[in-house]
Image (cartoon, rainbow, N blue to C red):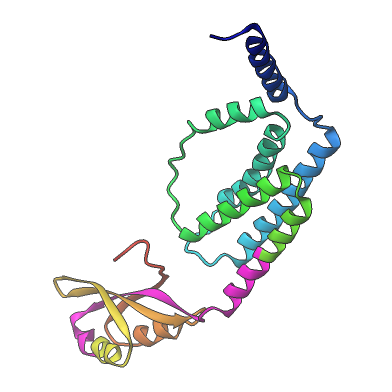
Amino acid sequence: MLTLNSRASIREIIEESLEIMSSHESLSPERALTALGTALICGIVIYFVYRFFYRGIVFSENYNILLVLVTVVTAFIINTISANIVLSLGMVGALSIVRFRSAVKDPLDIGFLFWGIAAGVTSGAGLYPAAMLGTAFIAATYILLTLFKKQKKSYLLIIRYGAQAEDGVNALLTCASYKLKNKTRTGESVELTIEIKVRRNNADAVEKYQAVAGVETVTLLEYSGEFMN
């Protein structure tokens, strides 16, 4: 059975706990602006790295702008909830119901998204040097990996030709390393789709097949494996 003193002690503990949870640090405008400004600088760095060194199939300007917004918004959220424990618990509950349905076409985009979130978290937590240093380090790492990766890339070569060009096209294929993706024959017309390795901005493959008599069209598409198997 609880005594009067024990009841008073429990009540004091509860009151002290509520007081601690409801108390918050003063979130000054200077601190908020510093956090948002740092996040914005990191977001701009991410923006330009993604814009000038992106090597995916299709560049999306909207997604690039989203990276900046995610960085700043994340810093805003972390900066706000770090000043109040009760608010942080409510924010976690509110964000737990958020679901994103947008499909990410390039796996590399996920890395950029996490980069923006990490920069926003460190900026919102007040770790400004860590946010700037981490952003610079990741940017330098990505740029170096992009510059020093293999020069040859996978392309889809689509050749449409008549029956009279069959021998000429096959002769060229025997001298090349390729992977057959599709071959469609309609009457006397053949459409051949193959995967080849070509150095960037090298159009010799197109000119070589175009020179064969009976070849109607030759199309070279950059290919990373997401669209066809």
Give percent across and percent down for residue 35.
77, 43
Residue 152 is a magenta residue: yes
Along the line of sight, which residue is nearer the eye, 94 or 207? 94
Taking the image as shown, residue 81 lies to the left or right of residue 203, namely right
Position of 6 relative to 38 (above/below): above
Residue 74 sits in quarter: top right
Along the line of sight, which residue is nearer the eye, 128 or 171? 128
Residue 212 sits in quarter: bottom left
Residue 127 is a magenta residue: no
**At 53% across and 9% down in the image, what residue appears?**
1
Position of 35 relative to 1 (above/below): below
Taking the image as shown, residue 197 lies to the left or right of residue 212, namely right
Give percent across and percent down for residue 70.
62, 44
Residue that sits furthest to the left in the current view: 187
**At 86% across and 37% down in the image, what residue appears?**
30
Residue 149 sits in quarter: bottom right
Position of 120 relative to 91 (above/below): below
Residue that sits furthest to the right in the current view: 30
Which residues lie in the magenta part? 138-167
Assign the C terminus to one quadrant of the image. bottom left
